[in-house]
Image (cartoon, grey):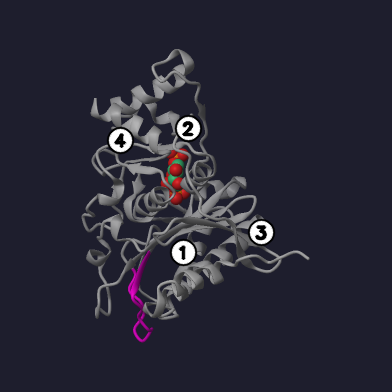
Amino acid sequence: MQKLGTTLSSFIIDEQRKLGNKASGEFTGLLNDITIACKGIANLVNMGDLADVLGATESENSMGDVQKKMDLIANDLFIDALENNGHCAGMASEELDEVLTLPDGKPRGNYLVTFDPLDGSSNMDINMDVGAIFSVLKAPKGKENPTAEDFAKPGTEQVAAGYCLYGPSSMMVLTTGTGVNGFTLCTSIGEFILTHPDMKIPEETAEFAINASNQRFWEPAVQEYIADCIQGEEGKLGKRYNMRWVAAMVGEIHRILCRGGVFLYPIDERNRDVGGKLRLLYEGNPMAMIVEQAGGAADTGYGRIMEVQPNGDPHQRVPVIMGSKNEVEKILSYHKS
Ligand code: AFP
């Protein structure tokens, strides 16, 4: 007989049980809310054009990116799942200009959630990988409506982080600070099942991911490292490298969790003033927590991503270098020299 295995909900309940009577069940409830949003998104992403969710809207987000139809739908699904159950006290989304205050009368919980509801959304229309990324922080005690300042916590204060990859199968990858576990969505029963326990990133790699079309804008350290990778066995690094680019950070980080690699979105001449391209709260911090929990490293080139002190702007950006530990250290040595 085929076994069902461990579902995401039972896994989380079990983790919380290990905390003894300290666990109220609220955190379990919060992760369950996020899971429901992700299942709703997975369903629509899988239906694609049949659900009329492809294409762009006429609106832009605060970063000036044109919002895709599915960006807005995914954002609404996250809000809907989180604002009604009393587990969450406030939210910040890559798709919203300001942090979101819960409507009056809705119960408030003890957690703040930040999310990028549809990372890599330009992949939607070409039927390629997209994902959702989320991070959970403790909410300030007794504050009805948390503000941007309450979200301005370094990544080291995250209590959980995860992503849901909508690829050939949908997978939820989660850390609550004790390792990383991956769950595959079984569409026939509508449950995420534990398929990738205790994910670990190999320390060594010969695979990098960077948008090479930006090469002329990169800093000298990154230019030099990539040039040495391309030299292969004849170059200073003495080995042949492979390159991949999914154009959705969720896809890149998932590949790195499965077989190692490094992902770089460095600061470049065009985004130096704003600090990089990727967002600290929605992409940098949650992915850094997952990568570190899986034994990898996550840095800006100048320090650990999770130790960056947020400046209070929920859309603060950050340069990103993350993945296999020894390779990240190699890249950092280029920065140092
Ligand atoms: P969106 O979340 O706006 O779709 O952007 C995705 C992303 O921020 C990140 O996931 C990718 O790594 C990166 O953009 C890809 O960007 P380019 O291919 O344009 O460099």
Q: In the rendered structure, which amino acid carries the disc numbered 3?
A: Met
Residue corresponding to mark 4: 270
Residue corresponding to mark 2: 205
> What stretch of residues is rendered in magenta?
100-113
Q: Are marks 2 and 4 in contact (CB under 8 Å)?
A: no
Work out whether mark 2 precedes mark 4 in sequence or the reverse, and give the earlier one: 2
Q: Position of residue 67 (x, y in %)?
A: 46, 54
Residue corresponding to mark 3: 47
Instruction: Tell me: residue 117, above or below residue 253.
Output: below
Q: In the rendered structure, which amino acid carries the disc numbered 4?
A: Arg
Neighbour class for label 3 at 10 Å: few (<14), some, many (≥20)?
few
Residue 115 visible at all: no
Q: Nearer the viewer, mark 2 or mark 3?
A: 2
Q: Position of residue 21 (x, y in %)?
A: 39, 80
Residue corresponding to mark 1: 75
Nearer to me, 184 or 68: 184
Q: Quadrant of residue 274?
A: top left
Assign a secondary structure to mark 4. loop
Q: The N terminus is located in which quarter?
A: bottom right
Instruction: Tell me: residue 229, above or below residue 56.
Output: above
Q: In the rendered structure, which amino acid carries the disc numbered 2?
A: Thr
Is 316 placed left or right of 57 in the picture? left
Instruction: Give me the C-alpha separation between circle 1 and circle 2.
Output: 35 Å
Q: Are marks 4 and 3 in contact (CB under 8 Å)?
A: no
Q: Nearer the viewer, mark 2 or mark 4?
A: 2
Give the residue drawn at x 38%, y 53%: 289
Q: Are marks 2 and 3 in contact (CB under 8 Å)?
A: no
Assign a secondary structure to mark 1. helix
